Image: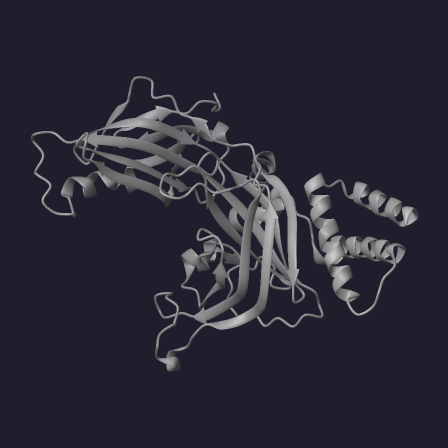
Amino acid sequence: MKHYMNEYRNAMDSLQLSNQQQESLFRAAVREATQEKTHRSVSRRAMAGIVLASVLALTACGIALKTASEAFAPVFGDSTSQKAVMDEIGTQLGTSATDNGVTITADAVIGDDHQAWIMYTLSWGSGTDIDLPEGIPQSPDEYAAQIPDNVIQFESCSDWSVISHDQFFDSDPNDNAIEFFQRVPINQSTVVPVEIHPYTVEFENLQFCGTDPYGNPLDYDDESVGSWETIIEGNWQLSFDIEYESAAVSVPLEGKESFELNGYTCEITNLSVSPISAFVEYSYTRTDADKPITTADDEIYDDIEKMYSNFYITTTSGQIYHTNATWGDNQFLEDSNSYSFSAGGSFTEIIPLDEIESVTVGNVTYKVPHTAS
């Protein structure tokens, strides 16, 4: 037993993995070895040998441990600048679960104060028969170019924030794997705080459905127009710590706590940016000049909520990036007769902090700290 465990430890050390990755890989190897030997007893020495062989096989073939830049390449590309930033702010995970010959691996995480992005790989061995639908995008850019032929999603997932159909990619159609990513909301008042130490998520059954000319799934009562079909049956539960160093910086308001938005003077209380997103909190207090609130669809509320073109960053090269609205909160505070808003969104690529010169909210532009001089 000692001889085999020494070989195991040496093999793991040579892979230069974190303790969490080593533990996850060891558990996956034990699980595979146990499944293969359920019908006969196995000695401790034999089990150690099986585990060692499984570890080496998993690292060589089944579970390809990825760096943050490798994991997020389908989303942000693999240019030298993007890879450098992703590896600087990202954290490698390498936690896996296997069922019916199919493995889901949480590869890496990047994040800031308001969201964490986790990249996953769903992979299978050459002996597993998987019939994927055609037309799975190789990157998010393909969604902008054409309407998808089908929608892919899990039948169920324990975390509501996990999957929407535009998060699945097939970066290499020639391998036995596809990728998907998840946005986990952190510290948002609109949701119950996510438990991230450890974070546990469960996936069940991967499905697909054809789409109509507008990209909507053909999942109607009329069976003639199509319905959801199961591609892969399985149940995968992963548990790991979402640990990363927040990449966000707080933007000084420098005495410019108010801004104009669609004709209303709002007060800003919090503003931050990171290489992946921007976030703002602001409020508006009603005045005697405002119309009385008579319906749920208040005009003032609608006007102030719509940041869209009024919230963006500018880089040192003069390029402007708007955010994709991925979270927000808004409410009317009756006691103070005011509206409270928060808005945030992600960029379509990772932007190094030293290349972000300013962020604009409404009609005011704020200088971002730690930018290139």
Image quadrant of residue 85?
Answer: top right
Which residue is outermost to the top? Answer: 255
Q: Is residue 245 above or below residue 97?
A: above
Residue 130: x %, y % from top left: 62, 71
Residue at image x 45%, y 68%?
150
Q: Is residue 170 visible?
A: yes
Q: Residue at x 79, y 70 (%)?
A: 39
Is residue 175 something one can see in this rendering? no
Residue 211 locus on image (x, y percent):
40, 69
Q: Residue farthest to the right? A: 3
How far across and how far down the image is residue 267, in percent?
Answer: 25, 27
State the image quarter where residue 244 is shown. Answer: top right
Residue 254 horizontal side relative to residue 245, left or right: left
Residue at left offset 56%, top offset 49%: 200
Return the residue nearer the eye: 362 or 181: 181
**Relative height, residue 41 to residue 333 (above, below):** below
Instruction: Give x and y (percent) for residue 283.
Output: 25, 31
Which colouring convention does the figure follow? Answer: one colour
Q: Is residue 33 above or below residue 238?
A: below
Q: Nearest the camera: 3 or 119?
A: 3
Residue at 51 percent of width and 58 percent of height: 168
Q: Nearer the viewer, residue 169 or 22?
A: 22
Count of numbered badges drawn on the protein: 0
Residue occupying the far bottom of the picture = 224
Position of 132 with respect to 41 (left or right) is: left
